[in-house]
Image (tube, rainbow, N blue to C red):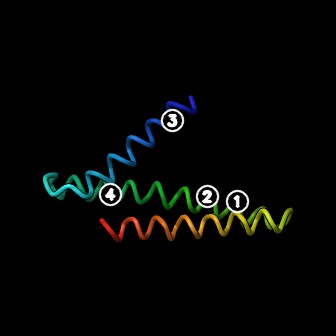
Amino acid sequence: MDTVLELLLDLFLEGGMEVSKSKQVPKYIRYPVLALVIAILVACLGLILLIGIAELRDSAFLGLLLIALAVLAAFVVFRRFRRT
């Protein structure tokens, strides 16, 4: 089940990134697909950030590590979308 979910998300996210770059796809298809891809990425980053904040109570090191990971991933995603 994990492999199927990973395959579907990878196919959707990579396909969405390619559709957002393509000038041959109409704008009314490109923009909603791009919005869905951004929404999925923001939700994943927000979940990592939320878990990092919740984990600060139990383990400060792990909480800070998760928060740093979320910030770094957000920076990488932002740079990737700025290039497209």
Q: Amino acid at mark 4?
A: Leu
Q: Which residue is mark 1?
A: 51
Identify the element where label 2 is drawn: helix
Q: Position of residue 49 (x, y in %)?
A: 64, 64
The circle drawn on residue 47 is 2
Q: Is residue 76 left or right of residue 47?
A: left
Q: Is residue 25 left or right of residue 20?
A: left
Q: Which residue is mark 4?
A: 34
Dot 1, how many residues are within 10 Å of its Cα: few (below 14), some (14-19), or many (20+)? some
Residue depicted at x 69% and y 63%: 66
Furthest-right residue in this view:
58
Identify the element where label 4 is drawn: helix
Dot 4, how many residues are within 10 Å of its Cα: few (below 14), some (14-19), or many (20+)? many
Label 3 or label 2, whichever lies nearer to me, is 3
Distance, label 4 to label 3, CA atoms, is 20 Å
Asked if labels 1 and 2 touch by Cβ distance under 8 angstroms, the answer is yes
* Position of the C terminus by quadrant: bottom left
Among the two numbered marks 3 and 1 on one chain, the one whose residue lies closer to the N terminus: 3
Q: Amino acid at mark 2?
A: Leu
Among the two numbered marks 2 and 4 on one chain, the one whose residue lies closer to the N terminus: 4
Q: Amino acid at mark 1?
A: Ile
Distance, label 2 to label 1, CA atoms, is 6 Å
Q: Position of residue 25 (x, y in %)?
A: 16, 52
The circle drawn on residue 5 is 3
How many marks the image carries: the answer is 4
Q: Amino acid at mark 3?
A: Leu
Distance, label 2 to label 4, CA atoms, is 20 Å
Among the two numbered marks 1 and 4 on one chain, the one whose residue lies closer to the N terminus: 4
